[in-house]
């Protein structure tokens, strides 16, 4: 397999946005999904004082964990105007403890209404884990 | 994938996917479309999503698919499904994240020629009055008590604040207020997102357009609605903003557990649902209605601002710059209705996502002046193309659960639109055609390019050909305001 060990790419979707995300493990998958989503939003962060936020998410399965994590990031962008570029993620079973570091958003080109569960499935692949996420925009 | 060969032709504009196609289907799927439109949707997953919707517990009659259908998440955009009360299910994903996204049409007696010299100023005034764009905040800030009133009263709240007339409310679907809204079922997150977004347009495909009545095809219906050939109108397309998005997000999350509790198995997790009469189903309905009322209030406040902009720019040039309401309809909604299904009158929850009501003549939900002609159905085209005003028919009541199409429907992905169309060039092309453009983002403009959508005229021909709507007037845009 060539190409980066972890990453994301935009797929064709008629109405919404769909990202394919891959990484060696769930932590990498969550981080890449976040970065891919921020790229779709066209996010830029302020240079200067850093902001820190802690998240503690428990979900019934890995797919729900992914959706809830991304929805948290959307909420933080919408309500506090914050974006993050450093993700310290600890996963125990289906619980995620995250320490996020970032800064106020200076540019956001697009709006995502929500992260959906549409056909969402995290699969094992030769790259570790792969999934597709559909965003309602 | 559903193969077009699986479809049974009913007429030139109606097709059926039999319930025998897949073992988990509870009802057939009925598609309203021409063969050409059908072939165009055959490539994406929309028909498979309609088949998935046909597996919802308690679904009755048929799942309906409108000609502007395209692939959504879970449930297709352009889909309609009715579930039986009290124990059928309600599915937040079958209503959508933008709860009560909808369209309002205001009409004037201002001749296009009278306004043309100041059209640029009018576009700028509308743009300034109606905040749009990503994460935009409005002119109003609501405290908790006021937000609760918005959720309970909908457009009626706006009347109390001087933003609406009695006629506006009468000419809004459901009077601009769904009963049964329950603010206590709305999360703190949704409340915090909703507090300062009343009176904002948002981004994405939401817009305000100034349009000219280009052609009237039903003189009597147009006269009743106050639509005159050559006169200006204003169309507003938006919904419940971050407030509704958060409510849907909250309940799609909590329903992931509800399906396990109620032993419901589904082909797509985005279709998660709960019985209408269950505590979970009741809670979602209370919150969803709150968001629906929020959206009615939002469009009402925007209508008020649009009227102010019209008066400011045109007040000194024309005798009467007033914009009267033609109608306001939702196209992402779940409502309790009574329909005849397989010869039996049943109370159902009608999920419409990217589909509108299209009640026929005589419907009690309509203001008295519209009962003879049927409910106005507002069909915005893609940006810079035509929009249509239709009316519901008797056949729409018997064949499509009183429903019709909601727009042109996407056919090209946003990704491809962004790559193949340049926002700046598109803006110039629209301006060259005499359409004033006020847009917050050029890539955003490109994603909404007309080439990314089906031909709205073809979509309208399909619903009219199927008999579920009748043409009243075609509108042509002269100014577009979008985030």
Image (cartoon, coloured by chain):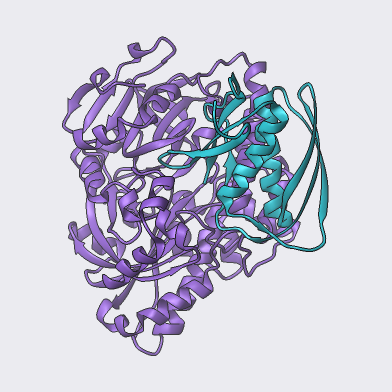
Chain colours: A cyan, B purple
Is residue B290 visible in the rendered structure shown here?
no
Q: Which is more toward the observer, B434 or B200? A: B434
Residue lying farthest bottom? B316
A88 lies left or right of B72? right
Residue at figure coordinates x 28%, y 83% from the top left: B114
Residue at the extreme front: A2
Query: Residue B18: horizontal and vertical position, in percent?
Result: 30, 16
Q: Nearer the viewer, residue B39 or B413?
A: B413
Q: Note whether A47 is above or below B452 in the view shown.
A: below
Q: Going by the image, does B214 lie left or right of B123? A: left
Towards the viewer: B407 or B363: B407
How far from the left and from the top, in percent, is residue B454? 29, 46
**In which image quadrant can residue B245 be found?**
top right
Taking the spot 47% from the left edge, 78% from the top edge, the residue there is B125
The vertical placement of B389 against B322, above or below, is above
Q: Is residue A1 left or right of residue B342?
A: right
Horizontal and vertical percent position of residue B395? 25, 36
Res. B147 visible in picture: yes
Identify the residue at horizontal 21%, vertical 39% (top origin): B467
Q: Nearer the viewer, residue B329 or A106?
A: A106
The total of numbered circles placed on residues is 0
Instruction: Judge left or right: residue A63 versus residue B419.
Output: right
Q: Position of residue B396 (x, y in %)?
A: 29, 37
Check the picture and name the quadrant holding the N terminus of chain A: top right
When asked about the image quadrant of residue B45, the answer is top left
């Amino acid at each position: 397999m060539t190409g980066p060990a972890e990453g994301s790419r935009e797929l064709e979707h008629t109405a919404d946005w769909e990202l394919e995300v891959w990484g060696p493990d769930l932590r990498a998958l969550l981080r890449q999904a976040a970065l891919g989503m921020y790229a779709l939003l066209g996010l830029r962060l302020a240079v200067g004082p850093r902001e820190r936020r802690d998240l503690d998410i428990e979900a019934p399965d890995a797919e729900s964990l992914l959706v809830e994590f991304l929805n948290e990031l959307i909420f933080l962008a919408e309500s506090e105007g914050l974006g993050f570029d450093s993700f310290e993620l600890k996963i125990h079973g289906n619980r995620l403890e995250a320490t996020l570091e970032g800064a106020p958003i200076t540019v956001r080109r697009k709006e995502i209404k929500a992260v959906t569960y549409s056909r969402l499935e995290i699969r094992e692949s030769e790259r570790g884990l792969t999934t597709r996420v559909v965003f309602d925009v | 994938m559903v193969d077009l060969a699986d479809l049974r032709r009913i007429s030139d504009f109606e097709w059926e996917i039999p319930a025998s196609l897949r073992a988990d289907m509870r009802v057939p799927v009925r598609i309203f479309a021409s063969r050409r439109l059908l072939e165009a949707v055959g490539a994406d997953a929309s028909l498979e999503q309609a088949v998935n919707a046909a597996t919802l517990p308690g679904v009755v009659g048929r799942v309906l698919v409108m000609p502007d259908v395209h692939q959504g998440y879970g449930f297709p955009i352009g889909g309609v499904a009715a579930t039986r009360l009290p124990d059928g299910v309600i599915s937040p994903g079958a209503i959508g994240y933008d709860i009560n996204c909808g369209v309002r049409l205001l009409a004037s007696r201002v001749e296009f020629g009278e306004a043309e010299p100041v059209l640029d100023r009018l576009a700028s005034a509308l743009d300034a009055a109606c905040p749009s764009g990503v994460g935009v905040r409005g002119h109003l800030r609501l405290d908790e008590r006021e937000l609760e009133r918005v959720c309970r009263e909908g457009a009626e709240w706006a009347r109390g604040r001087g933003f609406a007339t009695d006629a506006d409310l009468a000419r809004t679907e459901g009077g601009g207020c769904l009963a049964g809204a329950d603010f206590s079922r709305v999360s703190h997150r949704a409340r915090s997102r909703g507090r300062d977004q009343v009176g904002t347009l948002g981004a994405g495909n939401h817009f305000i357009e100034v349009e000219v009545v280009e052609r009237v095809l039903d003189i009597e219906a147009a006269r009743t609605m106050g639509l005159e050939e050559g006169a200006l109108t204003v169309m507003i397309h938006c919904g419940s903003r971050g407030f509704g998005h958060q409510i849907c997000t909250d309940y799609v999350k909590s329903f992931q557990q509800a399906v396990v509790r109620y032993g419901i198995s589904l082909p797509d997790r985005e279709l998660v649902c709960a019985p209408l009469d269950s505590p979970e189903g009741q809670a979602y309905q209370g919150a969803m209605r709150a968001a629906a009322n929020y959206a009615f209030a939002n469009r009402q406040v925007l209508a008020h601002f649009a009227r102010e902009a019209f008066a400011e720019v045109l007040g000194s040039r024309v005798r009467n710059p007033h914009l009267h309401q033609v109608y306001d309809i939702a196209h992402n909604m779940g409502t309790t209705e009574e329909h005849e299904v397989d010869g039996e009158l049943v109370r159902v929850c009608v999920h419409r996502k990217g589909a509108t009501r299209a009640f026929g003549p005589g419907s009690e939900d309509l203001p008295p002046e519209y009962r003879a002609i049927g409910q106005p159905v507002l069909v915005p085209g893609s940006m810079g193309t035509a929009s249509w005003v239709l009316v519901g028919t008797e056949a729409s009541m018997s064949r499509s659960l009183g429903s019709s199409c909601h727009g042109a429907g996407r056919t090209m992905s946003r990704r491809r639109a962004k790559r193949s169309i340049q926002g700046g060039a598109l803006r110039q092309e629209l301006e060259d055609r005499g359409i004033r453009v006020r847009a917050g983002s050029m890539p955003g403009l490109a994603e909404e390019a007309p080439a990314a959508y089906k031909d709205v005229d073809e979509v309208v021909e399909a619903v009219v050909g199927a008999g579920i709507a009748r043409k009243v007037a075609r509108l042509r845009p002269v100014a577009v305001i979008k985030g």
